[in-house]
Amino acid sequence: MCSVISRVKPVQRALALTLRLGTSTERSSYAAAERRRFSPGVTTRVDPLLAPCRSYCSRMALTEGLLFRQLFEKESSTYTYLLADTETKEAILVDPVLETIDRDLKLIHELGVNLKVAVNTHCHADHITSTGLMKKRLVGLKSAISKYSGATADILLSEGDKITFGKHYLTVRETPGHTDGCVTLVSWDQSMAFTGDALLIRGCGRTDFQQGSPEKLYESVHQKIFTLPDQCLVYPAHDYLGQTASTVGEERKFNPRLTKSLVEFANIMNNLNLPKPKKIDISVPANLVCGVHEV
């Protein structure tokens, strides 16, 4: 599957992808993954944004004219997302992690895209963002985060703001509850939603620190995310079980927490008794200043 597949509607592609993944056996999926892993890449004579490319299952874009990569940082189980317009080469990066900055910059260079904005879905507590250091290594790059996060950034986001790259854009939906500054970024055609820690695959972000509120989170998800089309793909900031994507329809039906009543949900969230993130005392102060202690 390539990031640019012509003459097939995004929704049809998403449904076809889901069916293929759902009906594959573990053995055949592994074999197919291995074949894709060792298949030849893009030649230097072909534009890497337009040429056939390796298959990345749900990690590839399903919209014509869009390049999309889902990247993973294993220590904090964080997903970083790169989106680019294949014509203008303008790009944005969602939730970059400090430990993988070299990987991300290498990919950006290889694909020949111009990174305009690096945006964080909230002030993370389990890792340090790479936006501050990345700004020092990419001329013209701007950082972005919610104005309610309390963090420093070039762009402070509010409800309805658009983050543009070429002919594409992501629209900001404020989804507080995990923190006051959480946002969900929804694609222009509502085919994708980058939900940060507000909505995870069959789960949600915790609500016991950083202004967390079960009531706010429940309202945010039900009013700002569950109102999206059923087929809208959900791309969270984390997953701890190897899952890469879900859909709004799936989560509305199967999410074991958010299918409960508000009272039941609040009771669940208030009794998780989780240890605090290992890096919270380092990550939060750093992320409040764009990932660097001295700006």
Image (spheres, helix red, strand yellow):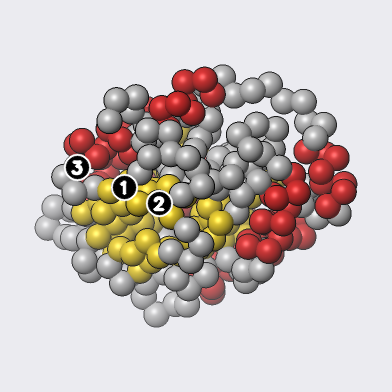
SS label for mark 3: loop
Task: Identify which residue is drawn at 65% across, 31% down.
Answer: 209
Is there any visible trace of residue 27 in the rendered image? no
Q: Which residue is mark 1?
A: 154
Identify which amino acid the numbered label 2 is placed on. Answer: Leu
User: Which element carries disc 1, helix, strand or loop?
Assistant: loop
Nearest the eye: 149 or 255? 149
Dot 2 crowding, Cα within 10 Å, few <14, some 14–19, many 20+: some
Task: Report how far apart the C-alphas of labels 3 and 1 lie in the structure.
Answer: 14 Å
The mark nearer the N terminus, 3 or 1, is: 3
Image quadrant assignment for residue 247 = bottom right
Q: Is residue 13 above or below residue 146?
A: below
- Residue at (54, 73) in percent of width and height: 11
Name the residue nearer the viewer: 151 or 169: 151
**Corner quadrant of residue 238:** top right
Left or right: where does residue 63 sit relative to residue 14? left
In this rendered view, identify the residue nearer to me: 45 or 112.
112
Residue at point 43%, 33% (across, down): 288
Give me the C-alpha separation between circle 1 and circle 2: 7 Å
The correct choice, above or below, for 123 with respect to 60 in the image is: above
Q: Residues within 10 Å of mark 3 (few under 14, many from 20)?
A: few
Residue tagged by mark 2?
156
**Residue 291: image x %, image y %?**
37, 31
Residue 139 is at least partly visible in this image = yes
Under mark 1, the amino acid is Asp
The residue under label 3 is 138
> Of the residues shown, which amino acid type is indicated by label 3?
Leu
